[in-house]
Image (tube, rainbow, N blue to C red):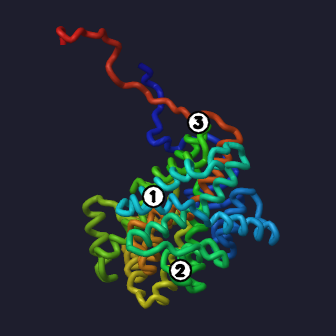
Amino acid sequence: MTEDVKINRGLKGIYFERSGVSHIDGAKGELLYRGYTIHDLAEHSTFEEVCYLLIHGELPTADALAAFDAQLKAGRTLPPQIHEIIHATRDGHPMDVLRTCVSALAALEPASHDKGEDGFLQNGLRLTSQVPMIIAAHQAIRNGRDPVPADPTLSHAANWLWMLKGEKPSADAARLADVDFILHAEHGANASSFAARVTVGTEANLHGAMVTALSTLAGPAHGGAAEDVMKMVQEIGKPENAAAYVKQKRGNREAVTGFGHRVYRAEDPRARHMRDGVRKLGQEMGAPEWYEILQAVVDAMKPYARHGLNVNVDFYSGVIYQLHGIPMDLYVPIFAIGRMPGWLVQCLEQQRSNILIRPLTLYNGPDARPYLPMDQR
């Protein structure tokens, strides 16, 4: 057997392809979408504009953005069978229901089988609009309510909150949801995006790739951090308990949720925008204590920053969802809403220069040996 082969477990540090979509500098804590810093996009852009940028490579003109927005709004429809499927699976985890419905859409919508580049694009934009509808419809149905119809006058983020809660969000709440989606829109070859590219590499259709991505995102090592942070905040209870909590965790060599990242050694550049959002929304909702607990944890973790244990974007996301009264099992599906354009553009890139992704494993089992008949074993 070959003994001098270097194994990069988890493909860590391996470049498998070139990409013109997002640039991540983990040492400096930088993230660019198509050359634009995440800070400029979070402060000045909209989710719709960022979707356009990721997909087309350039910021849109006013007319191009209006046409793109109209296309997204036109996609806010679901076949009636999807509501039937949601009723049948109403007691399932929202990620299981979402994955099942996206898979069903492949069978219900003939256009899903168009594997040309334009077909991928059209299916991806429609799914970008349909995913939040599925999540909101499931939340309504499992609570004995009728789904709230989409509102064509609202932005993508505001319409999501409208369908979920049945009331128009404030401008600040809608903007915070918009920023949340922008920050989660794309992040290179993360586990779910890589999994989607593997599926596209087999020449499967886009719906199949999205089902793969959703299945991968559902794993707690990828998409579950926001939920875990909220559980931690509830366990801490008060800001003055944070230091003792962190000391106990570190003393037991246990991770403190929301700190550290597979890529970033410096602070996750997305985190600062969610931090400001938590503070403002907490004040608006009359619950500033959640922000105070988070900041107390940050203060207690400062000695460990030199080891790369800095705040990541998920540290603040869960509290934002909690302030909206959103159940914890919807936190990962919300991540999926924001990541839809990133998955789409990764699939488009894979398709344009497609190759079957097929890595190797180094065999370390028994040497060749003879087969023994049953009576000799």
Rendered position, 196 above or below 248 = above
Q: SS class of the residue under badge 1?
A: helix
| Label 1 Cα crowd, 10 Å radius (few <14 / some 14-19 / many 20+) | some
Considering depth in this image, is 116 or 79 the residue closer to the camera? Answer: 79
Sequence-first disc among 2 and 1? 1
Query: Alpha-carbon distance for marks 2 and 1?
Result: 39 Å
From the viewer's perspective, tell me whether residue 374 is left or right of residue 364.
left
Residue at 48% x, 65% y is 135
Q: SS class of the residue under badge 3?
A: loop
The reply to whether callout 3 and callout 2 are in contact (CB within 8 Å) is no
| Label 2 Cα crowd, 10 Å radius (few <14 / some 14-19 / many 20+) | some
Tell me the residue that label 1 is attached to: 85
Tell me the residue that label 2 is attached to: 276
Rendered position, 251 above or below 217 = below
Quadrant in which the C terminus appears: top left
- Measuring from the top left, give residue 11's x and y in whole percent: 49, 41
Sequence-first disc among 3 and 2? 3
Mark 2: amino acid:
Asp
- Measuring from the top left, give residue 147's x and y in whole percent: 49, 72
Instruction: Return the mark for residue 202.
Output: 3
